């Protein structure tokens, strides 16, 4: 009988320790996951920015967002990139915009990775901004500043993007 009681107490202690560990380490795991996703998408954006910059320097002509979005692979691969940048977060791809937000005309000014439409995207965005030394801002205003950061839509709580400016 005492063996049964000792066994039950042991199981209860094991379950209690498992729950305590999940409670303590759960947030750390979620934050680490968001940080790794932010680093991966930021790396992809930086590679795209460097390829566009090298294209413009080597060819002497300006790349438009429309060219990047529709012919990017033909123009940049394999001379400037091994493969086109991929949105590693699971959101829709990486695309280019000009300073006014057009995806067809003007000079390619920014590469944008749209994050998946889920609450976890906010943590990815915040991790990308923290790594870049910035804070998330209204995407329509903040994307005009140089560098890498993230933005959101004040009217849509699930719209988050990570972006990198082309210099």
Image (cartoon, helix red, strand yellow):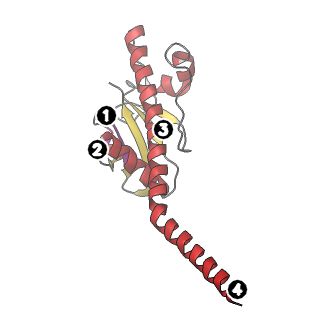
**What mark, if any, has residue 40 been given in the picture?**
3
Query: Which residue is nearer to you in this view: 154 or 31?
Result: 31
Choose mark 1 or mark 3, whichever is in front: 3
* Residue holding disc 2: 134
Closer-to-camera residue (127/117): 127
Name the residue that disc number 4 marks: 4
Residue at left offset 53%, top offset 22%: 72
Quadrant containing the N terminus is bottom right
Helix or strand or loop: what does disc 3 sit on? helix
The answer for how far apart the CA atoms under marks 4 and 1 are is 64 Å
Give the mark nearer the N terminus: 4 vs 3.
Answer: 4
Q: Residue at x 39, y 44 (%)?
A: 128
From the viewer's perspective, is the residue at label 3 or at label 2 nearer? Answer: 3
Q: Earlier in the sequence, mark 4 or mark 1?
A: 4
Q: Magenta segment range?
A: 142-151
Q: Which residue is mark 1?
A: 147
User: Which comes before the other along the chain, label 2 or label 4?
Assistant: 4
User: Do labels 1 and 2 touch, CB within 8 Å?
Assistant: yes
Q: Which is more N-terminal, label 3 or label 1?
A: 3
Name the spot of residue 125 as percent of width and height, x first. 41, 48
Q: Vertically, is 59 above or below 162?
A: above
Viewer can see residue 54: yes
Q: Quadrant of the C terminus?
A: top left
User: Which of the two labelled residues, at mark 3 and mark 2, occupies the earlier sequence position?
Assistant: 3
| Percent x, y of residue 92 | 55, 41
């Amino acid at each position: 009988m005492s063996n049964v009681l000792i066994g039950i107490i042991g199981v209860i202690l094991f379950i209690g320790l498992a729950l305590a560990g999940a409670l303590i380490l759960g947030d750390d795991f979620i934050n680490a996951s968001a940080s790794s996703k932010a680093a991966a998408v930021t790396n992809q954006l930086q590679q795209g920015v460097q390829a566009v910059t090298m294209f413009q320097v080597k060819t002497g002509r300006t790349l438009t967002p429309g060219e990047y979005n529709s012919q990017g692979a033909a123009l940049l691969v394999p001379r400037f990139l091994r493969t086109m940048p991929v949105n590693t977060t699971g959101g829709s791809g990486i695309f280019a915009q000009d300073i006014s937000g057009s995806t067809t005309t003007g000079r390619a000014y920014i590469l944008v990775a749209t994050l998946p439409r889920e609450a976890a995207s906010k943590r990815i965005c915040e991790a990308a901004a923290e790594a870049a030394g910035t804070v998330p801002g209204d995407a329509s205003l903040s994307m005009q500043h140089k560098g890498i950061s993230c933005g959101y839509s004040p009217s849509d709580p699930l719209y988050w993007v990570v972006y990198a400016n082309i210099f």
